[in-house]
Each structure stands twice: as structure tokens, then as C-alpha cells.
Image (tube, helix red, strand yellow):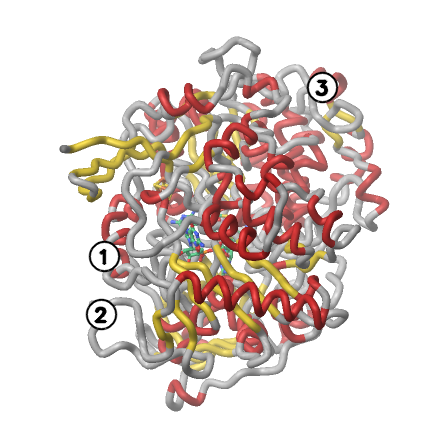
Amino acid sequence: MKQVVHAACPHDCPDACGVLITVDNGRAVNIQGDPAHPVTRGFLCAKVTKYLDRVYAPDRVLYPMRRVAPKGIAPKPPDKSAPAIRSDFERITWDEALDEITTRLNSIAAEFGSEAILPFSYGGTLGKLGYGSMDRRFFHRLGASQLSRNICSDAGETGVISVYGANISTEPEQFRHSKYIIAWAANIHGNNVHLWPFIEEARHNGAKLVVIDPYRTRTAACADWHLPINPGTDAALALGVMHVIIKENLHDAEYVSRHTLGFDALQAKVREYPPEKVAKWTGISAADIQKLAREYATVRPAVIRMNYGVQRSQNGGMASRAIAMLPCITGSWKEIGGGFQLSTSGAYELNTAALRRRDLMQSSLGRPARVLNMVELGKALNQVEDPPVKALFVYNSNPAAVCPNRNEVIRGLRRPDLFTVVHEQFLTDTTDYADIVLPATTFFEHKDLQDAYGHYFLQISNQAIEPLGECESNVDLFRMLAQRMGFKDDCFSDSVDDMIDQALDSPNPRLKGMDRKRLEKEGHMRLNFDGSEASSKPFLPYADGNFQTPSGKAELYNDRLKAEGLDPVAEFVAPEESRHNSSAKSFPLELLARKTNNFLNSTFSNLPSLQRMEQTGLLEMSRKDAETRGIRDGDPVRVFNRRGEIQLKARVDGAVSPGVVAAKLNWAKLTPGNLNINVLTSEKLSDMGNSATFYSVLVEVELFRGSPDAQSQVAPVENQRPQRG
Ligand SMILES: Nc1nc2c(c(=O)[nH]1)N[C@H]1C(S)=C(S)[C@@H](COP(=O)(O)OP(=O)(O)OC[C@H]3O[C@@H](n4cnc5c(=O)[nH]c(N)nc54)[C@H](O)[C@@H]3O)O[C@H]1N2
Ligand SMILES: Nc1nc2c(c(=O)[nH]1)N[C@H]1C(S)=C(S)[C@@H](COP(=O)(O)OP(=O)(O)OC[C@H]3O[C@@H](n4cnc5c(=O)[nH]c(N)nc54)[C@H](O)[C@@H]3O)O[C@H]1N2
Ligand code: SF4
Ligand SMILES: [Mo]
């Protein structure tokens, strides 16, 4: 009997697609995009189109396992299709696994205090329950250290919220009405492909697409205008554009006076950013800056799709803040197809407090537990004391691949005294350092509630098939652990449906009329923006002001920033690791340690059908930088800085300008030398939001001489404050 099940893709991607899974006799036999979902529109990306290969991969982790060999990368199994049990692990029962974990966590808590236990999770699933519910309850009740999950988006979100007061955006469907679209650090074909059909529709009707990106992405290659900006200089560009708009009186004086705060201060500030000066920082000519400003302010409606690439620089918060001001001074928020998009997640306001139960920390510690930033995992494992981290519980994440300053992370993960548990679907770079590996379900095998950060449709993701092997979902794992620990609080017996109901029980009026039963029936439901259900009227969040800042206005001047030592308007401060600073003398090239189009961060890296679509192990560089170093296309090169080094293959005439090089994130053990690009990235934090700075990295490149085994680990560079530019 064939059956079609509605699910939602939970991967860390703005599109949060509606998915239809066909199940035949308990086995998933087909996956497709939901044609009824207004943003998915019936198609999926290349990654999830091949999802059956992932679910039924021969190397799925299907049973609990215990380490029986020293930590580190084990020799490859002789037969690639062999099940995922190797010489470094033995299979154990769930009973044995739960016993060992609870015994070890209890003894660590008794000896060092419960904060010696650090949960570590991120975007494996963004399902509301799988991302943060029973797991948080468990760690709060245990009194474990808290993890600040800042590896991705906090700089940008903090920057945007400093202007608008909320993380709310133009909806993707409105892009079809735009006449001028700026993709600002937005790799739309690679990372946000469901926005593309709306852009194509707009272009068919005469819209212009401008891409501001130091890398010539596919989106840039098919744009009307590509501005290859120097990395980390976007704040200067935004201020320069505002300089021109205000000087030429192209701003919307009425919108500005009614709905913004601090325009005079902004006007004074942008005088410091004339196009000629901005051109020197950004590498974009003064004439182009003027043209961009004039077109953006006069071709209407104009929309900016800013994505997170802009905020992975040390000054990423300020850059995001400056860009977010643009639609406020042109008044483009008034127009259908105008405004700005970073994230839509702020509109959902599900009841995460009920899901996560922070109050449980009170019953264990009597106070909030200390907070460690996931960006600084290397530091947390090697330097933190009082108490030191003695247990690391990883789920929804692959820190050995995705965290910056990888050599430090691995040095920590190698510690024999660190007890590491990893709940995973595959034997990743991180399981190479696990004491216990636990098998995790995929979204085919569990139920969840799904919001989105790239549209406004809430969805239920139904379970399509029984869990494979002995896999357990995140919710079930932490419920079992809570029981073993003897936690008696009622919340530890909540079912998945109980928790979906709790999440939906929120005072947010946009959730009015949405309950589990209706979501189950309808699959997806658009948030209610005007009190009437199922309205399809375009959502114009700030057409009449209504900013969610303390002043109710768009805050072009923000006092609270001043208190943090930041410019209350905006300013350009060159990242410490950039060509605008003296450290560039020893390491003159700016590295973009990028994501791939066909993996998702490190997820999917091990899938042969996707590996065939993605060339990894390359360092893209300009002909000029290659020639001055005597490097030819295809040569092995050594890429290095004070944190580490890696051997890659040169791709001359890559998609970058002189001064910039680019490489892709991949599993380390799938790269020669068993290293990945994060050996070069830094743990430095961004100016706002304490976020990661993956795109503020200086390196040098030379022709590689010697064997891959000669690659060594290099001492970490000390953290320094950014320099004023
Ligand atoms: N296929 C695929 N899709 C993904 C992901 C993936 O790994 N693969 N990752 C998911 C995740 S976790 C996230 S957060 C989103 C992120 O999606 P995006 O925000 O699109 O993130 P990035 O790819 O980091 O950066 C976007 C673009 O910014 C450019 N960029 C880098 N530095 C600068 C700069 O200083 N200025 C400007 N103007 N541009 C710059 C990069 O070259 C890149 O093309 O995508 C999600 N979707
Ligand atoms: N160099 C460089 N590094 C980066 C970035 C970059 O652009 N360049 N991007 C950064 C960004 S934006 C982000 S968001 C982070 C992402 O960091 P992570 O969220 O750690 O990303 P992934 O590599 O996708 O790892 C997720 C893991 O969760 C597992 N998983 C999936 N579903 C489940 C589940 O239901 N339960 C459990 N227990 N596990 C599951 C997957 O198999 C996968 O191994 O990486 C960051 N690192
Ligand atoms: S990864 Fe993104 S584009 Fe691909 S199916 Fe999932 S939500 Fe859709
Ligand atoms: Mo991310």
C-alpha cells in the first residue's frame, strides 16, 4: 500500500521546504517538494532530492557504540559499503549506553560540579522539538553549562534588531513585484534556491538584479550587475550609498520624519563616507557607488536580500545595521516588493519557554548556569577552569568540522579525560573523538513542528517511516536519559504531541487559529498578519512604522550601542584580519572559508551522489596572486597562517579578485591530510552578537613541497581588538 506523508525539511536552510514522502510497505520510495507550498512550489534542492540515499545509506549509524581504541581518525573500513561499525567501536545495547552515560555524568557532576558538563548542539535539525525542547529540559535540570549558540547568525540579527527591534523581513513571495533586487552577500542559487523563481519572475517583468559579493557565485554570474566587494567592507559601502542618497536628496523625507529616530545623526555620520573614500576600502569605484545609490533610491520597488555572508566578518553586526537602514531612509518599506530580508524567524514567537524550561536550572543549581560560546569551543575545552569541561554531549552538530580554529578544537577533543557522547546519523569528524556514539533518526523517522527563517509558513513534519535500526530521535533520547537520571518533573514525560501543543500555546496573535490538528490536516499554514485567518494580503511589516524598538521607530541612532562602546549610528571598522590592517604584512590574502552549494555546512559531505556534484580540496585564487607566487592551475599549494595550515589544489582564475582566496568546508577526513579549512579560521568574535568570524581570515599561500603528512599544528594567535579603519 502506497501512502504519501507530508513532512518539512528541517535542515538549516531558510527555505524550510514542504516535502511529500511516498511510503510503500514501510519503506520510503520517493521524495518531492510539495506543490501546494507557496514557496517550495513543488521542487527541492539537489541535496534533499537525493535524501533516500541519505536515509538508507549503508554507513548510517544504527546502534549505540562504545569506543575501544584511542581517540582519533580510525583507518578506513576495507569495504566502503560495510555497516558503520569499525575497529575503533564495539556495538552495545541502549541499556548499556544509557547506564554508562548517566554513571559518567553523575560522577563528573559529583567531582567537578554539574557545570563541568557541556551540551553542544546546533543546526542538524531546526525542527522546533529536535532543535531545542527535551534536550534543553534535560541539561537545565542537570545544571549543565549553557551553550550560547552563536556560530551562525547573531551578529547580523543583533545588527538588524538594533534598527528594527525585531527579526522580521519582506516575505519571499513579494520579490516577484520588485523592480530592483540587491542580493547582498546572498548566495541564492546555493543557499536559498526557492527565492530564485520569484526573482526570475521579477526580472521577466523588467527588474534588475544586483549582487554584492566578493565571490562570483552562480547568482552573481547571472545577475545584471555584480559588484565584487572587498570582504568585510560592507558597512563602508552602505554608509557611502547613504551619503549619496542623502546628499542628492533622494531619501523619503516624510517616511524618515514619521518613522525613524536619529536621521540628523546619520546625516552627519555619512559625511565621513564620500564615495571616493569608500571606493578605497571596498574596491568598488566611486562612480559605481553613486550609480548603485541612485538606482536603489529611484527604481521602485527596491528590495534587499541580505544574507548571513555579510555578518561573518569581525564588523558584521555594524555592517548589517548599516545595510538595514537603507530601506528606512528610502521608505521602501511602504511598497509591496520593497523592504529588506534577512530572516523571518522573529514573526513566529512560538512558546519556546515552555519547550525549554529554563526554570529547571533553579531546581538544580539555584541560579542560571554559566554560559560558554560555541564559537570558542577550542578555548572551552583547553582553557576554561572552574570547573574545566569534563563531559561534552554533542547532538545536531559536527563541531570537529564546523568550529573555527579547528586545531584547538581537536586538541581539546583528544583529551583522554574528556568524556564525549555524540548522537549522530553518521560517523562524522566528531564521532572520531566520541567515547559513546548514539544512533539518531532522520526527519523521515520522527515527527516535529517546523517554522522557517525564509518564509512565513508554519508546518507539521509527520513521521513517514519507523526508525531504522535502533535510532532514536533527540526528544526520545533525552526523555530516556531523564528517566535514567531519576528526574521526576512532569515535563519529562511529555509526548511529541504534548510539546507541539505547548509550542503553539503562545500569546502571539499571528498564531491565532493554528492548532496541531489543523496543521496536521493542512500541512502548512501562513501566519496571520492582519488578524484574519488565511489572509493572503501581502505582509508589509513597517509600512506604517510600527518598529518594535523601544522608541517605536527605526533607530538610526541607538543609545544602547553606545553603552557597549559601539558607534550609536554606524561606522566602518576594518576587521583586524583584513588587508586594511598591518597584520596583512605577513598574511596578505583574505580567505573566504565558504559553504558548498551541494552540502549543507558539513552535512551531506559523505554522500557519494552529492560528492560527484561538488569539487572539494581546491583553493580558488586570482591569476595575479597565483603568478606572483609561481603557482599554476592544479598545483598543490600550502595555505597557512598562525593557527594552522592545509594542503589544497590551486584553481587559478577562480571566482575571486586579487587579494582574496576561497575554499570550501568539507569533512576533514575526506580531505588530504585529514584537515579541513577551519584549521585556518579564527575564534575571534564579531563586534555585535558574539558571533563567529569565518570570513575575516588572513592567510598566505605557497607552492606545496613535501608530503601531506608533514602538515603540522601551529600555535594559536592571540585575540586582539579590532582596529579603527
Ligand atoms: N547549499 C547550502 N545551503 C545552505 C548552507 C550550506 O552550507 N549549503 N548553509 C545554510 C546555513 S547554516 C546558512 S547560515 C545559510 C547562509 O546562507 P548565506 O547567508 O548565503 O551564507 P554564506 O554562504 O556564508 O554567504 C553568502 C555569500 O556572502 C559572500 N560573502 C562573504 N564575505 C562577504 C563580505 O564581506 N561581504 C559581502 N557582501 N559578501 C560576502 C560569500 O561569498 C557568499 O557567496 O545558508 C544555509 N543554506
Ligand atoms: N569554514 C566554515 N565553517 C562554518 C561555516 C562556514 O560558512 N564556513 N558556517 C557556519 C554556520 S553558518 C553554521 S550554521 C555551522 C553549522 O554547524 P552544524 O549545525 O554543526 O552543521 P552540520 O555540519 O550541518 O552538522 C549537523 C550534524 O547534525 C546531524 N544531525 C542531523 N539531524 C539530526 C538529528 O535529528 N539529531 C541528531 N542528534 N543529529 C542530527 C547531521 O548528521 C550533522 O552531522 O557551521 C559553521 N561553520
Ligand atoms: S535544504 Fe533547503 S532547499 Fe533543500 S529541501 Fe531543505 S529546505 Fe528545501
Ligand atoms: Mo548557519
Q: Which residue is mark 2?
A: 82
Indicate which label's residue lies in the foreground, 2 or 1: 2
What amino acid type is highlighted by mark number 1? Ser
Residue 640 in sight from this viewpoint: yes
Indicate which label's residue lies in the foreground, 2 or 3: 2
**Disc 3 crowd, CA 10 A, few/some/many (<14, 14-19, 20+):** some
**Disc 2 crowd, CA 10 A, few/some/many (<14, 14-19, 20+):** few
Q: Which residue is mark 3?
A: 253
Front one among 105 and 548: 105
Image disc number at residue 141: none
Quadrant of the frame with the N terminus:
top left
Q: Which residue is mark 1?
A: 609
Looking at the picture, does residue 548 appear above or below residue 673?
above
Question: Where residue 355 appears, x then y in whole percent?
Answer: 58, 38
Mark 3, secondary structure of its residue: helix
Front one among 377 and 552: 377
Q: Is mark 2 within 8 Å of ligand 2?
A: no
How far apart are the alpha carbons under marks 2 and 3?
67 Å
Question: Where residue 547 appears, x then y in whole percent?
Answer: 69, 24
Looking at the picture, does residue 103 appear above or below residue 300?
below
Mark 2, secondary structure of its residue: loop
Question: Where residue 551 appears, x then y in whole percent?
Answer: 79, 25
How far apart are the alpha carbons under marks 2 and 1?
17 Å
Quadrant of the frame with the C terminus:
bottom right
Q: Closer to the N terminus: mark 1 or mark 3?
A: 3
Q: Residue at x 38, y 59 (%)?
A: 439
Q: Closer to the N terminus: mark 2 or mark 3?
A: 2
What amino acid type is highlighted by mark number 3? Ala
**Disc 1 crowd, CA 10 A, few/some/many (<14, 14-19, 20+):** some
